[in-house]
Image: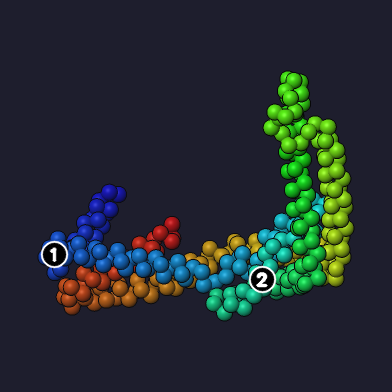
Amino acid sequence: MLRPIQNFVNIFFRKSRNINNEPINKVSLIVIIIVDLFILFNVFAGLDDISTWYLSPSQQYPCYSPWQTYQDNANVDRDFQIISDTFKNKNKGEETYPSQNEKHLGNVSSICVNFTSLQNSIIIPNNQEIFNTIQEKEQKINALENSNINIRNQYDSTLLEKIAGQPKNLSINEVEAQKAKQELEKNNQTINNLKEEIKQLKKDLLATPQASEFISFLDNEIKFNEVKKSYQNATFWYPSIQITFQLIFLLPLIFISLFVHNLSVEKGYGLMSLMSWHLLVIFFIPLLIKIF
């Protein structure tokens, strides 16, 4: 078992550093190795580029991930959440589909194209204004809640000062104890009013024709299951497609190098034999890595 391996290693090194059975000098060998590494780097770069020729599952079915997230979301507010994501990620998706189809092999799912088209249709000035109003009111709520936290902290400190008998003029707190409760109640009432307004605005936004049509599309289990099944099938086959394209790139290079090497050995072209041998080794390295 060890002898065949040892013989192969001996042949490999002999062919890699000899011309017509004469060893080449170290300087030339170093130069050849540097050139080998440069070529090998470019071969791997080419293979990496070729691996992206065919659309990946996420590119073919870009709607699967957000749709799956929507399906898994048990939150009662999930409809508004996906509409909110639409406004936050606007101008993405549909515009890139034509360029993807031109630059890559394969096509984007027609269901996903429809998904994005319906999603983008929501982004009109009237709906955008409603969404912006919701965000503004949510920001006001956050500001009031932060204010309540500060008031409570100051209220607690004021009580401690009062217990300790510290004079009011020496207090470091802006809110007096007797005013804290009144301020908190006022803020809480404002927060409740804002939440009711936001609740109504969300209903108004979801009731728009564009949002209603999109939500209805999302609730279509048949279309979702079709996308899910296709995505899983594409995910299974994608590695095989990638390595097939890479082999189409590598195998001709290997056969050409092998043909030139055998011809050079037969004709006694030492330098050509050495160069073709190194190229053959370089092309075999990524092939073996890909196979493993």
Where disc 1 sits, the SS reads loop
Q: Nearer the viewer, residue 114 or 75?
A: 75
Along the polypeptide, which appears first: circle 2 or circle 1? 1
Decide: few, some or many residues near mark 1? Use Cα within 10 Å; few <14, some 14-19, many ≥20. Answer: few
The local secondary structure at tag 2 comes to: loop
Mark 2 — residue?
A: 91
* Amino acid type, residue under disc 2 in the picture: Asn
Horizontal and vertical percent position of residue 124: 77, 72
Question: Residue 249, how many percent across, how many down?
Answer: 42, 73
Residue at 62% from the left image edge and 74% from the top image edge: 96
Q: Quadrant of residue 276?
A: bottom left
The Cα–Cα distance between marks 2 and 1, rounded to whole angstroms, is: 61 Å
Of circles 2 and 1, the one toward us is: 2
Q: Quadrant of the C terminus?
A: bottom left
Q: Residue at x 79, y 61 (%)?
A: 133
Q: Residue under circle 1?
A: 24
Q: Residue at x 83, y 36 (%)?
A: 179
Residue 19 at x, y = what percent? Answer: 15, 68
200 or 145, which lies in front? 145
Q: Percent from the top left, x then y, of residue 112?
A: 70, 70
Q: Is 180 placed above or below 261 here?
A: above
Dividing the picture into quarters, in which one does residue 39 lie? bottom left
Three-letter amino acid code at disc 1?
Ile
